[in-house]
Image (cartoon, rainbow, N blue to C red):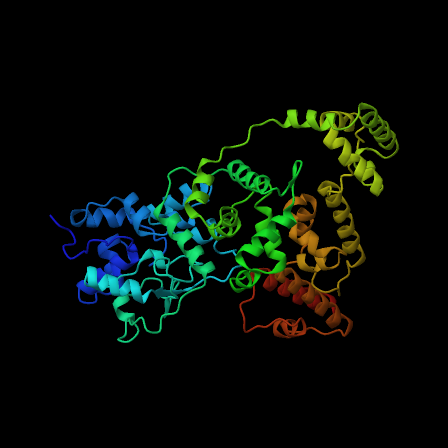
Amino acid sequence: MVTLPLFPQPYPNELLYSVLARYKVRCCVLPDKLLLKDVFGSNTIIASPEMPNGICCAVENIRPSTSLTAQDVIANHTLFPLYTAFCQASIKNSVLDQMLSTKNNTYTTSTGLATCFLKPVTYFRYCPACVLEQLDRFGEPFWDRRWFGFYNYCCPIHGIQMTATNIAIHDPSRHSFSPLLEHLVEGQISLKNASAASWQEQLASRASMYLISNSRVETFTFPQLTSFYRQLAVDANFDRGQFIKQTEVTQYIKRYWSWGWLQEIGFTQNNFENIVGTLFRKHRKQHMYVMHIVAGLPFFDGNIEAWWNAIVNSSEPRNDVTQKQNNNTCQHSKKVVLAWKTMWIDLLQKYGPKAARYATNESQKLYTAIYRADREWLLQTNQTYAVERISVNKRVSWKKRDNLTCKQLFKILYNTNDLYSPRRSQRWFLQCLPNSATIEHNLHRLPLTNLFLSAYGESYQEYQCRRLTQSTLLFANQDMRPEAWQMYRKARINTQRPISSVTKITCDWCTDWLINNTK
């Protein structure tokens, strides 16, 4: 039984987003949320043209209409092969799992797109020549994934500038599907106004198309990429022994692409040398595919296939660090190295390992020289002369602070233990302390302080009783026998509000005492 009989068959290199948009047209402009419910079984899937998620659910619902698997859709109808071409296995598998499931897709941050400083193309665009071929071959236009990619500025097939639309790739309306047919206006499909792109843009676009069409299951490792770029520099004579001439490498890449074009796509003098130049050093983080295109193609004179085969066939370097150290030791005479070691031991005895290294400029050079000549001896000797550092525990002793705070509170209590003081509430006691905020936020660590506040903190009813006592003394000095309402008024107690039983008993006791003790 066919679940979605009107679901179209994907064309070659058509985005899954475009297939869903054509399905929307076939259903007479189906509402976007209803489309998501039919295809994905959920109306919260984001309509991402580049790397959508929920593909497993979509394939299960449309499987009777097509024989494609979820892996086929990702490999042939998304930009997954392009954006993850140089990603590590962990990142690639994480993005793949997110695309298969209905969870949020974080590919822009995982693959480094969100942090790349180059100027991305953020709007849908199409090639008029490709659209004419689509209409002639298939009878309807669609979004071709070879037009996309954050840094594709021209059509990789015809080499002309693409026509931009007014719809953003990451549109604020996250669940809408816009077919290409809506953006085609008669006159725009004509090739009369088409302009050829620069050779740099054509080469970068063709390299991106090659990455899309030649997806590989294996992933590159950091040591493999490090070995590949190092070999490129060595073959081009940009090395000096074990070191790479990074400045000369970046100048060579600039001359190939031309600095004007590199500035147009977003490079500056600082970030070009820092980002592209570091590709020829040890790889510790992934870089965007466009960085590898810019850095690698000049060494192959723009031959994309030779460049890609060289990366795939590059092998990881062997772990021969000890052999290199022995070779470095042989470069210097034993007497020179022995003199260095003697000088270093004198510095160790005087300063210690860390301070000796940064004592003077000469000591820094000495440390570097010994490190290259005999690293194992240097590390062992530094460990022998390691300075034992005495760490001062500056953490708070809450037990000691609890005792001191409790003593301070008792002093405050005894100094203000008079009948006419303000209400001695817990907050009042804390405000009398010099570090009230710290004590208040850490009462759970101060059991004695907490117990004091609970025992001696004056409640509102107790404060009312104390004010009644004050009123009683005032009336006794005047030899007056007031009524209960006069006592409440003198004590500033509102009789319009409920009065507690403790306050009433205290008022009665004060009234009786005045009757018995006044004339």
For residue 519, say whether it is visible. no
Residue 121 lies in quadrant: bottom left
Check the picture and name the quadrant holding the C terminus.
bottom right
Q: Percent position (x, y) of residue 218?
A: 40, 37
Total numbered labels placed on residues in the image:
0
Whether residue 335 sits left or right of residue 232 in the image: it is right
Q: Residue at x 74, y 55 (%)?
A: 435
Which residue is rendered at x = 36% and y = 59% of the image?
147
Residue 48: x and y in percent read 35, 57
Residue 174 rendering spot, x and y as whole percentages: 36, 62
Q: Nearer the viewer, residue 280 or 390?
A: 280
Query: Residue 212 at what x, y percent from top left?
Result: 37, 49
Residue at the left extreme, as displayed: 1
Q: Residue at x 60, y 26 (%)?
A: 320
- Going by the image, does 492 lie left or right of 374? left
Q: Quadrant of residue 363?
A: top right
Residue 511 in view (yes/no): yes
| Nearest to the observer: residue 320 or residue 2 | 320
Q: Looking at the picture, does residue 221 appear above or below residue 406?
A: above
Can you tell which quarter of the image residue 241 is in?
top right
Report the side of 184 relative to 199 (left or right).
left
Q: Pick whichever, 182 or 298, lies toward us.
A: 298
